[in-house]
Image (cartoon, rainbow, N blue to C red):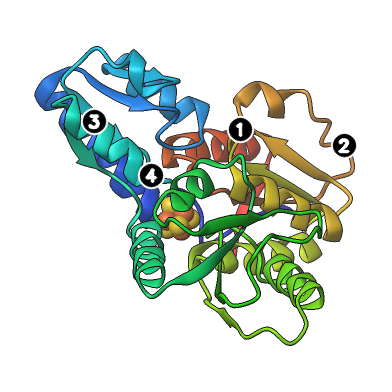
Amino acid sequence: MKKLFVAKNIGFCFGVKRTVEMAERLLAEYGEIYSTGDIVHNPLVMDALKAKGLKVVKKTAEIKGERFIVRSHGIGIDVFDYLEKRGIKVFDATCPSVKKIQSLIKKLDNRKYSIIIIGNEQHPEVIGLKKHGKNTVVFGGSCSPVKIKKSERVAVIGQTTLSFEEYIRRIRCLMELSPGREVMVYNTICKVTGERQKEAVEISKKADAVFVLGGRHSSNTAKLFETVKKHNRRAFYIEQMKDIEGISLAGINSIGLVSGTSTSDGFISEVKKYIKKKRYREVQ
Ligand code: SF4
């Protein structure tokens, strides 16, 4: 019998679910609402929301309507202020876990800490976090020194979707660059992504091939894919059905299915249906 292993932690995480449900509710009520950038990183989910009236613009200056929804990754205080000045009603769909980090940054900023954010400088979550404090700096992938005055107290926080290994690796590098300095490190890594990583390793070890479902721009899906690749030489990144249709299943007796946190249940069901048609049976 050919087997299909489906991860227990699959589909939307609570943060993405909350954002998508809020957007759907608002679109049903008002018909049109603006956002800057994709509110969740999945093209299929975004296409469905756009069809219901979501207007995605690159810059806030391009907003022509009266209502705005904040993406799950959050936005900076400067954007909130700008929207308020323009009289635009803001609906905050920031993931509660990201919101908590934004408040932490504000608190540390008031206590005069220098705040180092470990993460990807180009990612919307990090762009937003940076603007919640006056004294914030991003420490990216390359281990190059960050400019902090000797007298300043330092606090470190991480982008929610970093793996623990990656966070620890970068903290270590930071420590080596600043010997003797007192550094306060906060664990801001989202539990949800950690659990998915762990399960992905287990599934990768027992399946012949693993399908990682999620958007190409989704940071947590990309990291999940990297993890799966380390443990399984037949890892496939599946964003849309056309990505799966070209894959030869010859000699593959078991398939593992994992997903990023912004992959919808609808898409997962479609993929499962396709695999089951190829005579794979779902097992625990
Ligand atoms: S992965 Fe975690 S931090 Fe990101 S949206 Fe989901 S719950 Fe929030």
Give the x, y percent position of residue 24.
23, 32
Q: For mark 1, does the 10 Å Cα neighbourhood hold few (<14), some (14 to 19), or many (20 or more) residues?
A: some
Q: Nearer the viewer, residue 10 or 26?
A: 26
Q: Nearer the viewer, residue 5 or 99?
A: 99
Q: Earlier in the sequence, mark 1 or mark 2?
A: 2
User: Compared to 9, does 272 lie above or below?
Assistant: above
Can you tell which of label 1 and label 4 is closer to the viewer? 4
Q: Earlier in the sequence, mark 1 or mark 3?
A: 3
Residue at horizontal 49%, vertical 34%?
267
Give the numbered dot on residue 250: 2
User: Compared to 278, does 211 lie above or below?
Assistant: below
Give the numbered dot on residue 83: 3
Q: Earlier in the sequence, mark 2 or mark 4?
A: 4
**What's the CA distance linking mark 1 and mark 2?**
15 Å
Q: Does the residue at mark 3 contact the one at mark 4 (Cβ under 8 Å)?
A: no
Can you tell which of label 1 and label 3 is closer to the viewer? 3
Give the x, y percent position of residue 115.
53, 66
Q: Does the residue at mark 3 contact the one at mark 2 (Cβ under 8 Å)?
A: no
Q: Amino acid at mark 1?
A: Tyr
User: Compared to 176, does 275 lie above or below?
Assistant: above
* Quadrant of picture, ligand 1: bottom left
**What's the CA distance linking mark 3 and mark 4?**
11 Å
Q: Earlier in the sequence, mark 1 or mark 4?
A: 4
**What's the CA distance linking mark 1 and mark 3?**
45 Å
Q: Amino acid at mark 3?
A: Leu
Work out whether residue 1 can be spotted.
Answer: no
Residue at horizontal 51%, vertical 44%?
127
Q: Which residue is mark 4?
A: 76
Q: Does the residue at mark 2 contact the one at mark 4 (Cβ under 8 Å)?
A: no
Helix, strand or loop at label 4? It is: loop
Can you tell which of label 3 and label 2 is closer to the viewer? 3
Q: For mark 3, does the 10 Å Cα neighbourhood hold few (<14), some (14 to 19), or many (20 or more) residues?
A: some
